[in-house]
Amino acid sequence: MTSDFAFQVPAELETALQLKTVQYLVTQRPWLDLYGVNVRPVAPYGSASRRQNNDPALIHRCLPDELLLEVFFRMNPYDLGRAACVCRKWRYTLRNPAFWRTACLKAWQLSGVVENYKILQSKYESSWRKMWLLRPRVRTDGLYVSRNTYIRAGVREWSVTNPVHLVCYYRYIRFFPSGRFLYKTSSHTVKEVVKCMNLRASKVDDVFSGRYSLTDDKVEAAFLYPGLGPTMWKVCLRLRGTTAGANNRMDILSLVTSKVDSMVSGPEEDIIGVVEDLQEDEISRTSHKRGLAPFAFVPFEEVETSVLNLPVEKMDYYVPG
């Protein structure tokens, strides 16, 4: 099985990337002279564009440029976006395609390195940063949460009127770059469920593992319920974002459960197409029309403070936007 974070770049593509990075560092930017300030990106140690420069900022005087570059290379893309808002020097430094190349190849490793380079040149003008912002992708640094509510009528003895209960439950999905995902349906909030949404989850946690595929902005995911009577759970989702590159919303286009009369056999990687290959007399499909609230993305660092942790008494209905 493919590793979640491992990929290799062909030698010819790596050489072309190094040439493009050098061109970025030595390119003249005359528009900066209009401000009367010499703002230079941080150049790698030993490069041709590296020379002595007296920077008035304290952090640039105390922290060498090569260490600052190492810090940037160890940051995730969303932290790089926040760092670009610090100053103009960091902003132009983080335009270096080397930072975004690694993030893009990791996010779309299922497509393959060669295919990603073809898409980069044909659709995104050879800009890794533009590809990261505009190409739909599933986020792996948090959980997608769908909050669903419905009203259930209660019973009260010796009373003319009956009480009404507002029931709330959640659907949780966590994606991995290798093509696997975890799914869980629970009445517990996100800060309680995040502890068990990992590959080491036991059967007691009711966390199911399956495979997903990404085509443009459409995500198809499926897994098999264990038991004597196998049941296939399959969902079709559409990715979107509240801002460019966010990919923090997913709309449920269809949700189907299929009861298979015969035992399903085959590798886990082909689980999405298993049901389509079965005959109509071997399968019973049920299309669900309720509990299809859109998914909202919650990063791991925000699970404790997310509004999705609020009880029904304080938030009876949630609009993901």
Image (cartoon, rainbow, N blue to C red):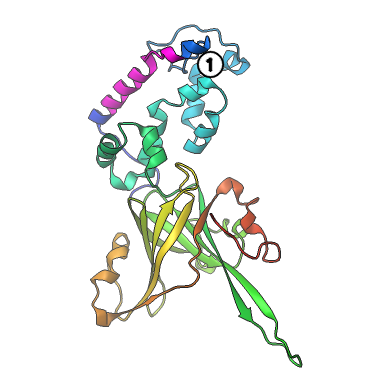
Q: Which residue is mark 1?
A: 64
Q: Residue furthest bottom?
A: 158
* Residue 231 in sight in this render: no
Q: Percent position (x, y) of residue 184?
A: 50, 64
Q: Percent position (x, y) of residue 181?
A: 42, 57
**Image vertical order of residue 185 relative to residue 12, above or below:** below
Q: Percent position (x, y) of residue 237?
A: 40, 59
> Secondary structure of the magenta portion, mostly?
helix
Q: Is residue 244 left or right of residue 275?
A: right
Q: Nearer the viewer, residue 119 or 264?
A: 119
Q: Residue at (39%, 67%) from the top-left corner?
A: 254
**Image vertical order of residue 297 relative to residue 64, above or below:** below
Q: Residue at (47%, 48%) from the top-left corner?
A: 241
Q: Is residue 22 magenta?
A: yes
Magenta residues span 14-31
Quadrant of the rendered image containing residue 311: bottom right
**Image vertical order of residue 142 relative to residue 30, above or below:** below
Q: Which amino acid, by three-letter code, is at mark 1?
A: Pro
Quadrant of the rendered image containing residue 269: bottom left
* Residue 159 in sight in this render: yes
Q: Percent position (x, y) of residue 182?
A: 45, 59
Dot 1 lies on which element?
A: loop
Q: Is residue 293 magenta?
A: no
